[in-house]
Image (cartoon, rainbow, N blue to C red):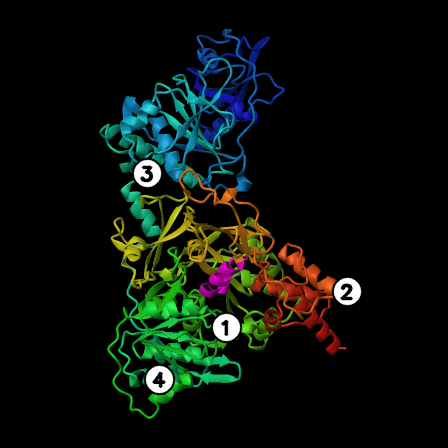
Amino acid sequence: MTTPTTDAAAGCHSLVLRLPGPDGPRHLRSAAMPGPVRIWPTPVPAGPDEPAAADRRRAESLRPIHPHSPPLRAVALHYADGTVDLVLVAVRAAIPPAALRRIARLDGPGEALPTRPAATTRPGPAHRGGPDWGLGDPELRGVAGSAPIDLTALGPQAEKLLLPAIALAVSRYGGGDRTELGVLDLDDGPGEHLRVHPVQEHPRCSIADFLRRFDQAPAPAPQPPPVGVVLSPAFDEGSYTACLTPVFPLTIQIDRGSSRAVCRFDRGTVDATIAQRFCAHVAHLARQLADGPADRPLSELELVPRAEQAALLRAGGAGHPPPAPGRIDRAFEKVAAGQPEAVALLAGDERLTYRQLDDRATAVAAGLNALDIAPGSRIGVCLERDADLVATLLGVLKAGCAYVPMDPRYPAQRLSFTARNAGTPLVITTAPEFPPVPGTRLLTPAALTELGAGQEAGPRPAAGDDDPAYVIYTSGSTGTPKGVVVPHRNVLALLRATADDLTLGPDDTWTLFHSSAFDFSVWEIWGCLLTGGRLVVVPYWTTRDTEEFYTLLTEHHVTVLNQTPSAFAPLIRNDHRARANLALRLIIFGGEPLDVRMLAPWFARHPAPDCRVVNMFGITETTVHVTAQTVTPHEVTAGSRSVGRPLPGWSVSIRDEQGRVLPPGPAGEIYVGGAGVASHYLGRPDLTAQRFVHDEPTGERVYRSGDKGRLHPDGRLDHLGRLDNQVKIRGHRIELDEIRTVLLGAPHVTAAAVVVNRDQPDDPASSRIDAYLVLPAAADPAQVLAHAKAMLPDYMMPATITEVAEIPLTINGKPDTSRLPAPRTGPAGTPQPAPGTPQAAPGGLADDILGIWSKLLNTPVNPQDNFFTLGGNSLLVIRVLAEMRERNLPKVSPKQFYAHSTAAQFVELVRQLSDAGR
């Protein structure tokens, strides 16, 4: 097969010769051409060593032969001091390297030099994609860059070791997966043939074993890989360039019989800084291959030298972070003392000043003291979003305890597990059906404050910065949630790292939009109250009604808004329709990956200077946020995946599977260190030791996130999803294995698999959890659904259940999700309508409603179908209601929707509302 290039430049080579005197030959002769080749004299008004001369020499040597021109061009560059360089450019297929060498052996002016006929094949198809780690600039596609590879320390071994070193670097940059290194040997007989070396670094492979692989001839390949080597004959006569543009997106030219090598790359697919680092790493690996004993394991070889590792870690923020002394409750008291009459909290009809909020929290702490709750205890808090919630959380901290937030809408079994696992002596709740837990007392906020009323305030418990402030439970791969213990100092460090940059202060109004069991609420509550802002508590049903929430934003002049991208998408559509005057100056995204392209309509109405948009990557185990990236229309146009640089006091690095530091470009696991790293997983020393590790390169304690990412040369981080079976849906971190474990615990289920699909790839609201079960014929899938619903919160419930004969497996014995069938339209066991259930009459309103549901659920809907068992979720509810408004149908609240979730019921509700509005 011919070489993988299409453009003329990749099929050409060039040679620059310094002539012995000012009078060079006027013509050359080549057997590939019918007559003598004229040498074109070109004056250069500069000395040969001046930059202008070097630029002209380079430009002339890289100017390709036009496809319809003769295959050889000769230009004589006459410099100001009389020196002459002869630049020969030729088509390799017509004048191969050996022929070009003969032409270059000039014995006298005008001598006709014979050449042998060469193959006249032209280059074949090109590889247009670069390596995944290249991070080139698409606007520079076609612009070639170059970088040297320093092999002077290797001496005569250079040629033998360079190819294995390149292959090993490609493997490390590619994550250790099987890859290929292209080889184009210009001495490979007539024509030019692409071959490849398969590369994979096996754990027990030795240096000797690895080197022996390259004694074998490479195999022919139908397609060129993104990285390759051009093996070129060495030219002592001058400066030789084997390909005027890179044959592969990243091409390394190795001159045989010498220690010279140069990397050429397409800057559209490979960033210049990354190419230069790659070359340095190749040289570093080659030196280790040369110096290491033959039986040394290949895995011990460093890709990145120690000094460079240290520099990368410093650039990523590594280093001992300055201490963040203090506690959340004491910091709040300091703010309250400075502005006691400023409004701290708005919740429905309640309006609390900082003094009033402090007093109410003190009453909660007094109640805990009256119960003799020991400082350091973990106190469950299961309350609706209201003023009592915020006062209770603050009061728990004032009592020297840690709060354990629980959402009242969680299933009873999950609430019970959390209270038992946390060892809570008390759960403060107004939920009428909170499950009884042995050893745990249940009290309402009112009853608790009543207990402490009239008691003299005792001495404040001894409390320190390292005391736990809260324990938030996240999804766990073993089937049970895991509690993340976060100290006070972490939260204060977060505020210190962000307050100045985001200019947070008393003039701001925030919303508390998220559940207290979701760590975004930590940022919303304490980010606002510890910087003197005003916190507007958003009722649960308002968070589900985009129009009501938009009205709240305008009425309260909210300036700081925190959202998941999924929740913000319908707000953009509502903003386009309502066109009200929002006071927003800062929007912070978190909780799930942001596709910046969704923000184009927002920036069309809200210029970036008026409202700053910040995308923040974070993890519960690293205290809400880790990095920050300001998003502008430029990022939207570029489709950037950057989540920015680490916050001051936080650190980020990318590691391979062995924990080795990776340079910018290659993808690996994100390690997070610094001020935000949580204390531990509650009661899980094994998991704590696995994820919270001592980092040898930095000497610090870091968190292995399980997230996949890569660094840019400028230090920005791209978040690339998960390495394991964890996903994020609408801001919630979900272990699919937890759902699978729950399903396997249902009666009669013998095997299960859980996957996430999207009906619309670019729409996060269309994300859906699909479950696959192996059940005996007599089993009822409805029982499985009931079992799952009793243990999983709504956001973790499968939208579909599909019965299969078996779960297909990979050769490694893991579920092969690619071979699972398409999910059922709706879960098995969808209940049939009970006698007397309204049946929607065909035509008119019913057709409109069923059409909207069918469109958004991406499946036909019948009157007896339930919206949520067909895969509906809270965001799709918002979209249904928005589309109804666009069609001038009656306004339905999300609360009404949830109470009438069967199509026939919903149609009847809309009909009644329509009749009432006439």
In reply to whether residue 623 is colored magenta, the answer given is: no
Q: Give the residue at mark 4.
A: 362
Q: What span is in magenta?
A: 782-799
Q: Of callouts 4 and 3, which one flags the residue occurring earlier in the amino acid sequence?
A: 3
Element on which disc 3 rests: loop
Q: Of callouts 2 and 3, which one flags the residue occurring earlier in the amino acid sequence?
A: 3
In reply to whether residue 787 is colored magenta, the answer given is: yes
Q: Specify whether residue 247 is in view.
A: yes
Give the number of the disc on residue 303.
Answer: 3
Of discs 2 and 3, which sits in the foreground? 2
**How many residues crowd mark 4 within 10 Å: few (<14), some (14–19), many (20+)?**
many
**How many residues crowd mark 2 within 10 Å: few (<14), some (14–19), many (20+)?**
few
Q: Of callouts 1 and 3, which one flags the residue occurring earlier in the amino acid sequence?
A: 3
Q: Of callouts 1 and 4, which one flags the residue occurring earlier in the amino acid sequence?
A: 4
Question: How far is the residue under mark 2 from the one under mark 3?
Answer: 68 Å
Q: Give the residue at mark 1.
A: 511
Q: Do the residues labelled 2 and 3 touch (CB within 8 Å)?
A: no
Q: Specify whether residue 359 is in view.
A: no
Of discs 2 and 1, which sits in the foreground? 2
Residue at 32%, 40% in the rendered image: 304
Residue placed furthest toward the bottom = 454
- Write down the quadrant of residue 810 in the picture: top left
The three-letter amino acid code for the residue at tag 2 is Gly
Q: Of callouts 2 and 4, which one flags the residue occurring earlier in the amino acid sequence?
A: 4
Instruction: Say if 96 sits above or below 821 in the image.
Output: above
Element on which disc 1 rests: strand
